[in-house]
Image (spheres, rainbow, N blue to C red):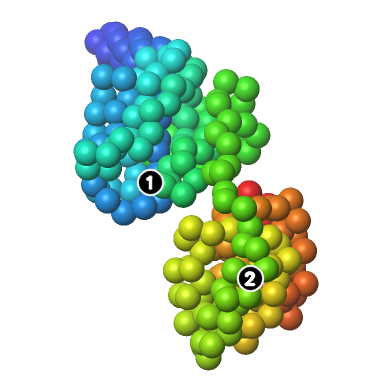
Amino acid sequence: MKNIISLAFLLILSVAVRAQTNTTAEVFIELSDEGRYTITLDDQSVTSTRSRIRFFDVERGSATLTIALGNQQLLNNTIRLTAGKRFVFSYSKRLGLRALGELDLYNNNRYALDNWNGYQQQRPNNIPSFPRRRLPRAMDQQQFGSFLRVIKNEAFDNNKHNVFVAAIKNNALTVDQLIQVLKLYNFDDGKLKTAFFAFDYITDPQRFFQVRDSFVFLSSKEKLDEFLSKK
């Protein structure tokens, strides 16, 4: 009899705990850049150098999210949260805050303890859409000519890529310009590395699929296809 009572008590307790959990939400944030960040979500605050930050038991409804690096505030946004859901975001200095999606806190009646990647692929209506970073105009012909010559002077693909990364930080390219850059590379691996990095600096990303013809091997083209399918 005692065992039956104990079992019933545990069952009631489990249901009560789950019901309590489902009245709140969770927010997971992945940071792309290194540094010591302070992230505040309403009355919860975390200061850390870790790349992944988790907030539990967040009240549903509107919540204020701020991100600071040292004394510099980088972000102040309002997000809307639904009870019983985990909202997954990423943040980078280059792209800002991006809402990756949401997932249920329970999967087959089991709590999804540390699930970052099982979120729904379609963006729910209650998650705000954050625009792509505003880029400067693509380089003019003179600027691009100088840019191209600097990269061409490097013999090895790895050095070409390093020059590209350093030079593109405050600039932008069209897809046609990127294709010209990739023609200077010797191997597909180097082209892929630079193409992936370049995506966030392209002024006409809807044409990015045209970069596919820059690669020799089908496997490289398939890697580009996979990359674009996640954008």
Q: Is residue 64 above or below residue 103?
A: above
Number of marks present in the image shown:
2
Please, is residue 18 above or below residue 221 in the view?
above
Question: For residue 142, which numbered disc appears in the image?
Answer: 2
Residue 2 image offset from top left, x and y in percent? 24, 10
Q: Position of residue 207 (x, y in %)?
A: 75, 56
Is residue 223 found left or right of 100 in the rendered image? right
For residue 153, side relative to residue 181 (left or right): left
Q: Relative to the observer, which residue lies in front, 223 or 105?
A: 223
Task: State the separation of the CA atoms marked 1 and 2.
Answer: 36 Å
User: What residue is at 73 percent from the left and 74 percent from the top?
Assistant: 214
Q: Residue reaching furthest bottom?
A: 155
Residue at image point 22% right, 42% down? 70
User: Looking at the image, do the residues carrying marks 1 and 2 touch, with CB atoms under 8 Å apart?
Assistant: no
For disc 2, the neighbor class at 10 Å (few under 14, some 14 to 19, many from 20) is: few
Quadrant holding the N terminus = top left
> Residue at point 69% right, 75% down?
180
Which corner quadrant of the image does residue 171 belong to?
bottom right
* Label 1: which secondary element: strand
Where is residue 59, by image quadrant?
top left
Identify residue for label 1. 31
Callout 1: 10 Å neighbours few (<14), some, many (20+)?
A: some
From the viewer's side, name the closer residue of 107 and 40: 40
In the picture shown, does residue 96 fall above or below 201? Answer: above
Q: Is residue 48 visible?
A: no
Residue under the image location 45 percent in, 13 percent down = 61
Q: Secondary structure at mark 2?
A: helix
Report the side of 156 relative to 177 (left or right).
left
> Residue 37 at what x, y percent from top left?
27, 42
Q: Give the mark nearer the N terminus: 1 vs 2.
A: 1
Image mark for residue 83: none
Look at label 2 and name its amino acid. Gln
